[in-house]
Amino acid sequence: MRKTNWFALLAPMLILLLPAGFYWSNYYMNIFCLVLMWVVIGCSWNLLAGFTGQVSFGHAVFFGVGAYSAGVLQLHLAISPWWGLLIAGFVAMTVGFLVGVICFRLRGPYFALGTIAVGEMVRHLALYFHDFTGGNLGITVAQDYKIADKTPYFYVIAGIALLCFYTIRFVMRSKWGFYFVAVREDQDAAESMGISTFKYKSLSLMLSSFFTGMAGAFALLFLGYIDPEVVFSLHFISIMAILVAIIGGVGTQWGPVVGAFIMVGVQETFRSGWFGLADDMFGDAFAATIKGAHAFVFGILVVIVILFLANGVVGDWGKLTGIVRPKKAEKGGA
């Protein structure tokens, strides 16, 4: 019987809820909320791409659908968008299944290109049907639903992040997880063994889109505003989700968690001008340049990871820390 590793089981809860044990200003709680939101998105993308081998460039579709599921409730039905947290995941899951029906006919880079095409199509649809989505004007959350204190938002997204993390952990230790990995390693071999690759790729995509949709609904509540150019953005959502997983470690349980802390930390460090130091040291002009340099630093991080840490920070943790396992002595003497 396999022994339960209680540290591995409880560590996510302790780490993701750790900020709640201290007093933080709204500024830092805002950062923690963004980190946890990207933990959810990164873990969701990693389930589909890292564990099932289906590299998606279209996760902005599910994020945006989740956000608009909550926004439309207020815009047309005058229902609190907080209810959107309950339905956004299921709406995004349905969209995920439909996307899978279309795109799972393709493989490899063609699948990735297909998801980009679907993402752009959905973005243009959101702009075209402006009477339903608000078009370029987007959707703004009514002031009655906005809370000045960021702590309640932290608990909401921490709960979603923990649910996402533990669900994926459970799934990857179940029969589904073995089938996901079989599809990733060799789809033709998996089919020859009687595994329905379409079924399990669809299950992986639906589960991935469910949590991404919940993250999108949370984004509307947290930010107070959404528009198609942001929530359906290839750059701001889909590419960022990929970077979070790559930096942390694709195909690892903890990779997206670590990647989210790194990426949001780097982004906020530069966006704030090194937390105000750049303004004092170099003046406003150079500080403005620094505040927009996070994309350049992201590129440097990706190059470093590709060259020296191909498995990400978590996957190559031993290499990163200089830990080298001693080689086992070869059997037999010379």
Image (cartoon, helix red, strand yellow):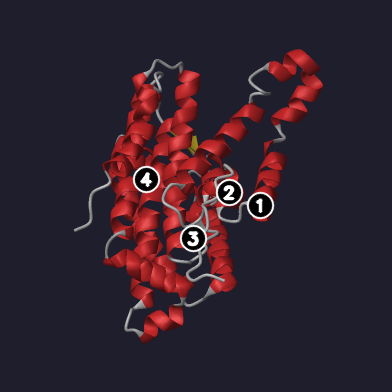
Can you name the residue that lies furthest to the bottom here?
192
Work out how far the residue at label 4 is from the one at label 2, CA to CA, in angstroms. Answer: 35 Å
Work out how far the residue at label 2 is from the one at label 1, CA to CA, in angstroms. Answer: 9 Å
Can you name the residue that lies furthest to the top here?
280
Work out how far the residue at label 2 is from the one at label 3, CA to CA, in angstroms. Answer: 18 Å
Please report whichever mark, 2 or 3, sits nearer to the chain's N-terminal start: 2
Q: Nearer the viewer, mark 1 or mark 3?
A: 3
Disc 4 and disc 2 in contact, CB within 8 angstroms: no
In this rendering, position of residue 214 left or right of residue 278: left
Relative to 208, say whether 80 is above or below.
above
Image coordinates of residue 268 in percent, x first then y, are 59, 29
Please report whichever mark, 2 or 1, sits nearer to the chain's N-terminal start: 1
Residue type at mark 1 is: Phe
Work out how far the residue at label 3 is from the one at label 4, CA to CA, in angstroms. Answer: 47 Å
Q: Quadrant of residue 199?
A: bottom left
Q: Is residue 14 visible?
A: yes
Q: Nearer the viewer, mark 2 or mark 3?
A: 3
Q: Quadrant of residue 155?
A: top left
Disc 4 and disc 1 in contact, CB within 8 angstroms: no
Please report whichever mark, 1 or 3, sits nearer to the chain's N-terminal start: 1
Tell me the element at label 4: helix
Residue type at mark 2 is: Lys
Instruction: Quickly name the residue at label 2.
Output: 319
Residue type at mark 4 is: Met
Q: Which mark is residue 214?
A: 4
Q: Nearer the viewer, mark 4 or mark 2?
A: 2
Q: Which mark is residue 328?
A: 3
Work out how far the residue at label 1 is from the one at label 3, CA to CA, in angstroms. Answer: 25 Å
Residue drawn where x is 59% and y is 70% of the image: 109
Relative to 288, say whether 174 is above or below.
below
